[in-house]
Amino acid sequence: GEREAMYLKNIVSSTDQLGRLIADLTDLAMIEAGKLKMEKSVFDFPEMPRDILPGISINAQNKGVELIVQGYPEGVRVDGDKFRLAQVLMNLLNNAIKFTPAGKRVELSFRREWKYISVLIKDSGIGIHPSETKKIFEKFYQAKYQKDDKLRKQGWGLGLCIAQEIVRSHKGDIGAASAGLGKGSTFWFKIPVS
């Protein structure tokens, strides 16, 4: 009946979370051992977001969040690990969706800056306290200033720490900016174009 269906849904969702946590912990262990390998090859950069967006869009729809993509950076080629870079973008987009209330929007945009391609993810979510924009990239960091307990506990998890490592091993940079609590955030990363 209905109750069983609900139990099943909860089990599936917690198994999913557990699976993600284990994958994250494995990645983290590799990072700490200096063994997180990047399998780099030159690829067409827009392929990477195109691969992951269908799945992310479903996630956004389920939450009632509008996902807007501002034009792909056509003709940009990157020497990198497509799977790992996709992992970074997925993490940032899923976080943005998680922290954005239903009815609001998440915007993904790209900027070509000299030798770099920048990816920007702007959400209309809970925002970040100015003192924490650097700290959230630390392992297991949970925002101190977040009023919503449930969201605070979900935190940014290990994902940002791993994302930072991946971006840095591409000789890139990653960061976050926010006008303050309740004002949304913009997460960005940039990597060199080939």
Image: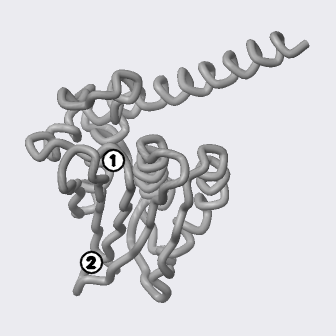
Hey, which residue is sitting farthest left in the picture? 131
Amino acid at dot 1: Ala
Hey, which residue is sitting farthest right in the picture? 1
The residue nearer to you, when weighing 40 against 187, is 187
Picture layout, residue 57 above or below residue 182: below
Quadrant in the picture for the C terminus: bottom left
Residue 80 place in picture, x, y as percent: 40, 65
Residue 188 appears anywhere in the view? yes
Identify the residue at horizontal 29%, vertical 68% (top origin): 191
Mark 2–mark 1 distance (CA, rounded to whole Å): 17 Å
Type of colouring: one colour
Residue 29 appears anywhere in the view? no
Amino acid at dot 2: Tyr
Tell me the SS state at disc 2. Answer: strand
Answer left or right for 130 relative to 14. left
Mark 2 crowdedness (10 Å alpha carbons): few <14, some 14-19, many ≥20: some
Identify the residue at horizontal 56%, vertical 72% (top origin): 47
Picture layout, residue 25 above or below residue 179: above
Tell me the SS state at disc 1. Answer: helix
Identify the residue at horizontal 64%, vertical 25% (top origin): 13
Identify the residue at horizontal 51%, vertical 78% (top origin): 44
If you read the primary sequence from the N terminus, does the residue marked by circle 2 or circle 1 appear first? Answer: 2
Answer left or right for 7 relative to 171. right
Query: Which residue matches tag 2?
Result: 116
Answer left or right for 97 relative to 29. right
The residue nearer to you, when weighing 150 against 168, is 150
Residue 124 place in picture, x, y as percent: 38, 54
Picture layout, residue 21 above or below residue 84: above
Q: Which numbered marker is on residue 163?
A: 1
